[in-house]
Amino acid sequence: MSFQPTIVGSGLIGWQFLQATKNQQVDAFNKSTLLNRDVEYFRDNIGSVKSAEELVNNRRLLSVALSAFGLEDQIDSKFLLKRVIEEGTGDDGLARKLSDGRYMALAGAFSFEPVLDAKTSDSNFVSSILEKYETNVLAKMERGLSDTGDSNTSYGNSVREQVKLSIAREGEAFKQGIGAVKSAEDLIKAPRFLLVALTAFGLEEKVGQKSLLKSVLEQGGKDPSALANILGDSRYEELASAFEFDRKPVSPMAAPGFADNILSDFRTHEFEVAVGNVDENLRFALNFERAIPQLAKNESSDNTKWYQVLGTTSLRKVFQSALGLPSGFSQIDLDKQLEVIKEKVDTRFGIKNFSDLTDPDIGARIIESFLLQSQVQSTLSTGAQQTALTMLQAIPRRSLF
């Protein structure tokens, strides 16, 4: 049995109840058996997909991928989706020519060009290297002070302070710059970083043997015949294994964290769909609450962001209702739509720049206005229908014979 959210009331009352119970309802939703079957299948299989064609031909994987971007209704548009993904987000790509920003997001997420995600970009890796570096530098310092009999002298304490400052300075430089080092050659050409790395493994005296170190790092530590494993010194093997410059490029879909990022968006979107099955306006509100701050953080121009709003049905509907714009608004010239919506959000909500929408208070006011306007329209529509029904019932029935 599929999960059905509990919604008490409608409009603003329903929204307030949903907000108050959202965490508990999301937790219950995420435990859904059907949902987790799709989640596990995607996580287990997406890494083996090598092309856009393979993705669009695997309906189960494609369903999850599209749902993560709110494009689940396009699952049968295989030719379109294949082009969007293959052509990417470049100026000539189909995704950029479409008026719906969801296609750009899809194209940006799925790239099938093999990439090498160097460990030097991993904060945990950097921290482990710097921890080893500090430990070895301090140990070497203490041995030196002990040999000279200065362990417990004021001179020794002064040396300790200077060494700690040096460790902090070199560590910060390493932390800030090592992410740009993607290969053994890059590291060899960065003597400051190389010295930190070698010191971390007790190899600082080898800093001048660049040819040897380059071979050690490039060959890695996995192959028994690799230079690091035949030198008879475990420090080389530890150095090579730590940096793993011998790793081969892999598909981005196989990279750690890729599936989890997509699945996080998938779960969020599917919860919104479940809410929409009970109250469509609450789904639009949830989508707005999530999507607008993300869009606001994009580096594109304000006009581009507003065009994306106008090209996304759910976002357009929230703004159009919140601002009291007529149903025929979408039929006028697109540039005129842009002009009107920018003027209206400024007048109604004080929004000068798109970035103002990252303010939670402004977002909450827009959602409240949308829900109230939608409820008013629903009430008016229901009242009109009831009036028409009453009038029809009041007309005397005439005999047909």
Image (tube, helix red, strand yellow):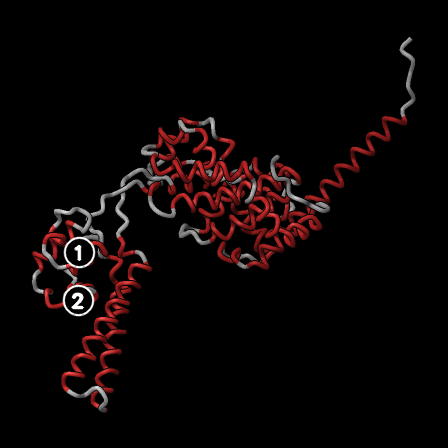
Q: Residues within 10 Å of mark 2 (few under 14, many from 20)?
A: some
Judge left or right: residue 389 versus residue 53.
Answer: right
The quadrant holding residue 387 is top right
Q: Residues within 10 Å of mark 1 (few under 14, many from 20)?
A: many
Q: Which residue is mark 2?
A: 202
Q: Position of residue 392 (x, y in %)?
A: 85, 26
Q: Position of residue 292 (x, y in %)?
A: 52, 50
**Residue 393 versus residue 53: which sits nearer the camera?**
53
Q: Is residue 372 visible?
A: no
Q: Residue at x 71, y 41 (%)?
A: 377
The quadrant holding residue 45 is top left
Q: Is residue 266 visible?
A: yes
Q: Residue at x 61, y 55 (%)?
A: 364
Which quadrant is home to the N terminus? top right
Compared to residue 344, the image places residue 205 above or below, namely below
Q: Which residue is mark 1?
A: 237
What's under tag 2, amino acid-wise? Answer: Gly
Q: Position of residue 34 (x, y in %)?
A: 54, 36
Q: Residue at x 41, y 31 (%)?
A: 81
Element marked by disc 2:
loop
Mark-to-mark CA distance, 1 and 2? 12 Å
Judge left or right: residue 7 versus residue 183.
Answer: right
